[in-house]
Amino acid sequence: MDPFHPPEIVVYGTSVIALSPDLVTIELGVVKEGKSAQAVQQETNTIMAQVYKALFTQNVHKDSIQTIEISIYPQYDYMDGSQLLKGFIAANMISLQTTDLSNIGDLLDIAVRNGANRISNITFRVLNEDYYYQHALQSALHNGYQKALTIANRSLTPVSIKELTAANSTLYKASHMEYSTSSPVPISPGKIEIEAKVEMIYCIS
């Protein structure tokens, strides 16, 4: 054994914390087609005004709503190599955040009943995720150290510790859904998993 280069071992410590989400972001809005660009844009704006008004009746604060897309673009048909203008598609989309996960279904229903016809994403998160990640990281460090002790069966000197993950509790439950009052989509938050992983190098004394 080289006394100047004592043996080293590399271990990986991991920890996973499962939590119930307490924050949801919903992206929803109105997408319409029509022959006139001005008319179809006006239609989406009018419907979205109704959606806003309806959401406010559900104790949704205006600061929790953000416009994320207002767009209009042409549609074309192709015939005999020629491009023919078919009409226009207009979209008016918003992002809505709430901590009342028990009210998700009601929010979607009332939005749809007032004209919303597109749900782009439903994203569940954990508030204060960094707090929980720090706990997971501590457990991962302990896990790695215990592994190293088991392998070496003697005293250890830490050489380096590298964090391999970062706090991220995002869980996507839906993406680009069409929603209608005749076929409501059940929403289940499920569990959020916050994972921490570290690489640990020890010198065996």
Image: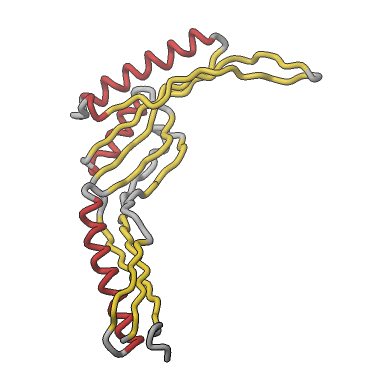
**Could you tell me residue 3's position as x and y percent?**
38, 88
Residue farthest toward the left in the current orientation of the protein? 59
On the rendered image, what quadrant is the C terminus found in?
bottom left
* Residue at x 26% of width, y 57% of height: 133
On the rendered image, what quadrant is the N terminus found in?
bottom left
User: How was this image coloured?
Assistant: secondary structure
Q: Nearer the viewer, residue 170 or 186?
A: 170
**Could you tell me residue 162's position as x and y percent?**
35, 64
* Residue at x 47% of width, y 37% of height: 176
Residue farthest toward the right in the current orientation of the protein? 80
**Could you tell me residue 106's position as x and y percent?**
27, 35
Q: Nearer the viewer, residue 106 or 138?
A: 138
Among the 4 quarters of the image, the one containing residue 196: bottom left
Q: Is residue 201 left or right of residue 129?
A: right
**Total number of numbered discs in the rendering:** 0
* Residue at x 26% of width, y 26% of height: 55
Q: Measured along the vertical axis of the image, is residue 28 above or below residue 2?
A: above
* Residue at x 23% of width, y 59% of height: 134
Q: Is residue 1 left or right of residue 134?
A: right
Q: Measured along the vertical axis of the image, is residue 195 above or below residue 86?
A: below
Q: Measured along the vertical axis of the image, is residue 30 above or below residue 153?
A: above
**Could you tell me residue 115's position as x and y percent?**
38, 23
Q: Measured along the vertical axis of the image, is residue 51 above or below residue 104?
A: above
